[in-house]
Image: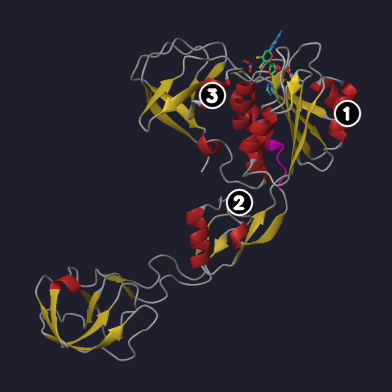
């Protein structure tokens, strides 16, 4: 095991390489939100299935644009006109209704005047004449691949799958996650907390970050800094696909995560990444189980969960794009030169510019909670002036759509 901190990209690649795919399972469409497609999704129908009107108005024969016309019937959504439209005739038509046989033009209602069944042109006919007609197959055709494997099912993908004729989807099982936070100083949330103690906030935070990505979440902790207690906690994690620990990852006498993992039979894949905060990240495996050992400082835990844990949970479900998406934004104020590790600075992005928070301490939750992004500041980068562009990670919604 190398002791030199790994570059971030190499460390992320090593974690993703450990991600075994979970099983594919047929799931009712309502339960597929947030899941990843195990196979490409093929359309089971053509959309639109026939030429439809895109406007409320009148269907006319092709080229019959001058009028007047006699209204011979109606085509409403779900109630098509049974006959054929001939020159000199018009069929009242609603948005989404089938264009009747013989028609090739939809004239907008606003461009007409109607008296009884007599229709005249008052405005301009459509140009080109078919522009208000949605042609059969405009959206997709039967058999088309409408979504590739690895797509995350969001609201639009859910709607598309239903429109393409699906009532269920083949998605991958969400990994079972065990969260183990450790430290003698930790007190369960809400209990009285003397000055030498600290409320255990990381477990809940990690559970919240992983909520949409993990299936069952087993909370183990807070556990004492004691090898037997850690053994007992790890023994309860035998069904988990991923075990995330927080705290005890560093070099102190009470940092027992690594020895406990070794006793449990895990093999360390790597320890330490050249990032700040989050350097003491530890990654290990035990059979197909992957252990992500996060540093205990709350901001370090957050940043490393964002960069490693969530991508792992996505990759195990076959996500096409498991790493956090980034954007670029303009600094509102100068930044000093980069440190010896790539830094993730808490910041506020207003949609265009990004303001770095002055507080950089890895224990400081107030600045973290007042941020909606992490600003990447490269190791040894020169100082940045206001107005320079920086890469940012959006952290609302876990950074990924
Ligand atoms: N001599 C060195 N000391 C430290 C180094 C180093 O390289 N050499 N690295 C520092 C860095 S960087 C970090 S980050 C921390 C990480 O240490 P651990 O992962 O061992 O974390 P702990 O010592 O257990 O805790 C650190 C800090 O976080 C608090 N904590 C822990 N768990 C929770 C929790 N569940 N909820 C809220 N807060 C938690 C804990 O009380 C400590 O204050 O090590 C540095 N030291
Ligand atoms: O890496 Mo530690 O996470 O800098 O505080």
Residue found 31% across the figure and 72% down from its top: 95
Secondary structure type for disc 1? helix
Q: Main secondary structure of the magenta part?
A: loop
**Separation of residues labelled 1 and 3 (CA atoms):** 32 Å
Q: Which residues are magenta?
A: 17-21
Q: Earlier in the sequence, mark 2 or mark 3?
A: 2
In the rendered image of this protein, does residue 32 appear above or below residue 300? below
Viewer-side residue, 205 vs 317? 205
Task: From the viewer's perspective, tell me whether residue 373 is left or right of residue 207.
Answer: left
User: What number is the disc on residue 368?
Assistant: 3
Q: Which label sits in the foreground, 2 or 3?
A: 3
Q: Earlier in the sequence, mark 1 or mark 3?
A: 1
**Separation of residues labelled 2 and 3 (CA atoms):** 29 Å
Q: Which label sits in the foreground, 1 or 3?
A: 3
Secondary structure type for disc 2? loop
Residue 113 visible, this orientation: yes
**Separation of residues labelled 2 and 1 (CA atoms):** 34 Å
Magenta region includes residue 18? yes
Measured from the top left, where is residue 262 in percent x and y?
A: 86, 25
User: What number is the disc on residue 36?
Assistant: 2
In the rendered image of this protein, does residue 326 appear above or below residue 193? below
Task: From the viewer's perspective, tell me whether residue 397 is left or right of residue 25.
Answer: left
Q: Please rate how many residues cluster around mark 1, counting C-alpha atoms within 10 Å: few if below 14, some from 14 to 19, many from 20.
A: some
Task: From the viewer's perspective, tell me whether residue 110 is left or right of residue 370.
Answer: left
In the rendered image of this protein, does residue 49 appear above or below residue 345? below
Measured from the top left, where is residue 123 in percent x and y?
A: 10, 71
Residue found 72% across the figure and 15% down from its top: 194
Residue found 34% across the figure and 16% down from its top: 386
Determine which residue is flagged by label 1.
Answer: 231
Q: Earlier in the sequence, mark 2 or mark 1?
A: 2
């Amino acid at each position: 095991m190398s002791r030199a901190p790994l570059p971030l990209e190499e460390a992320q690649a090593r974690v993703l390489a450990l991600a075994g795919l979970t099983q594919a399972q047929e799931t009712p469409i309502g339960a597929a939100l947030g899941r990843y497609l195990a196979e490409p999704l093929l359309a089971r129908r053509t959309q639109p299935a026939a030429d439809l009107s895109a406007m409320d108005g009148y269907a006319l024969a092709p080229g019959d644009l001058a009028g007047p016309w006699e209204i011979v019937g109606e085509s409403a959504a779900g109630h098509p006109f049974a006959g054929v439209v001939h020159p000199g005739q018009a069929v009242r038509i609603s948005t989404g209704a089938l264009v009747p046989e013989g028609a090739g033009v939809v004239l907008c209602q606003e461009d007409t005047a109607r008296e009884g069944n007599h229709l005249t042109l008052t405005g301009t006919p459509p140009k080109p004449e078919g522009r208000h007609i949605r042609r059969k197959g405009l959206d997709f055709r039967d058999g088309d691949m409408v979504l590739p494997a690895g797509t995350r099912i969001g609201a639009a993908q859910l709607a598309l799958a239903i429109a393409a004729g699906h009532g269920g989807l083949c998605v991958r099982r969400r990994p079972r996650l065990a969260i183990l936070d450790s430290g003698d100083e930790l007190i369960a949330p809400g209990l009285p907390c003397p000055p030498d103690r600290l409320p255990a906030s990381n477990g809940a935070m990690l559970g919240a970050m992983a909520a949409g990505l993990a299936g069952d979440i087993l909370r183990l902790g807070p556990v004492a800094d004691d090898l037997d207690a850690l053994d007992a906690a790890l023994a309860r994690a035998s069904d988990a696909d991923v075990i995330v620990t927080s705290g005890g990852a560093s070099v102190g006498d009470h940092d027992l995560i690594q020895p406990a993992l070794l006793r449990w039979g895990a093999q360390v894949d790597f320890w330490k990444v050249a990032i700040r905060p989050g350097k003491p990240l530890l990654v290990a495996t035990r059979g197909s189980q992957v252990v992500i050992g996060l540093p205990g400082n709350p901001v370090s835990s957050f940043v490393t969960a964002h960069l490693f844990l969530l991508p792992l949970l996505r990759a195990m479900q076959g996500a096409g794009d498991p790493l956090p998406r980034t954007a670029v934004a303009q600094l509102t104020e100068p930044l000093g030169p980069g440190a010896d590790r790539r830094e993730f600075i808490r910041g506020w992005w207003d949609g265009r510019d990004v303001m770095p928070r002055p507080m950089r301490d890895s224990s400081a939750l107030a600045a973290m909670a007042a941020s909606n992004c992490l600003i990447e500041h490269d190791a040894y980068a020169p100082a940045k002036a206001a107005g320079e562009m920086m890469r940012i990670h959006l952290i609302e919604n876990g950074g990924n759509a």
